[in-house]
Amino acid sequence: MNPYNRLLGEIKDWCKEIKVRHKANMWRYPKEKLDGNWSLADLYQRTQAAEQLGYDVQLEAKEDGLFVVYVKKIEIPWKWE
């Protein structure tokens, strides 16, 4: 395998990793209780924990409520920088 094909294979694998990032549902705010008094302290702590574990946090609005989702961060390989 020549260097070009090796690099092309690495780039394809990296692109697949970006397209299909690992996600984990971590918290749900039920739609019927969104008007309640929710403390952001729990969300803050969970967001900090996600950062330490290498995850971003996304909010997703769905029919049955608001979901807090952890999404794995993707980093550019050091040898490409």
Image (cartoon, rainbow, N blue to C red):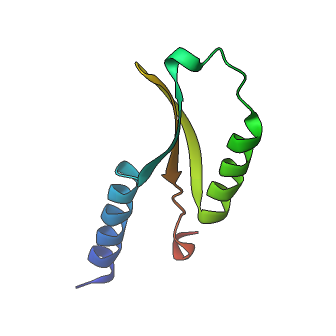
Residue at the spot 52% in from the left edge and 49% down from the top edge: 70
Task: Give the side of residue 75 with respect to residue 1, left or right.
Answer: right
Task: Give the side of residue 30 with respect to residue 2, left or right.
Answer: right
Taking depth in this image into account, of 57 and 44 the one nearest to the observer is 44
Task: Give the side of residue 6 with respect to residue 24, left or right.
Answer: left
* Picture coordinates of residue 12, whole percent (x, y): 31, 62
Residue at the spot 67% in from the left edge and 18% down from the top edge: 36
Residue at the spot 51% in from the left edge and 59% down from the top edge: 74
Residue 59's place in the image compared with 4, above or below, is above
Residue extending farthest to the left is: 1
Residue extending farthest to the bottom is: 1
Residue 74's place in the image compared with 24, above or below, is below
* Picture coordinates of residue 28, whole percent (x, y): 52, 34
Residue 79's place in the image compared with 27, above or below, is below
* Picture coordinates of residue 71, whole percent (x, y): 50, 50
The number of callouts visible is 0
Residue at the spot 59% in from the left edge and 44% down from the top edge: 57
* Picture coordinates of residue 72, whole percent (x, y): 50, 56
Taking depth in this image into account, of 38 and 6 the one nearest to the observer is 38
Where is the C terminus found, in terms of image quarters?
Answer: bottom right
Taking depth in this image into account, of 28 and 50 the one nearest to the observer is 28
Where is the N terminus found, in terms of image quarters?
Answer: bottom left
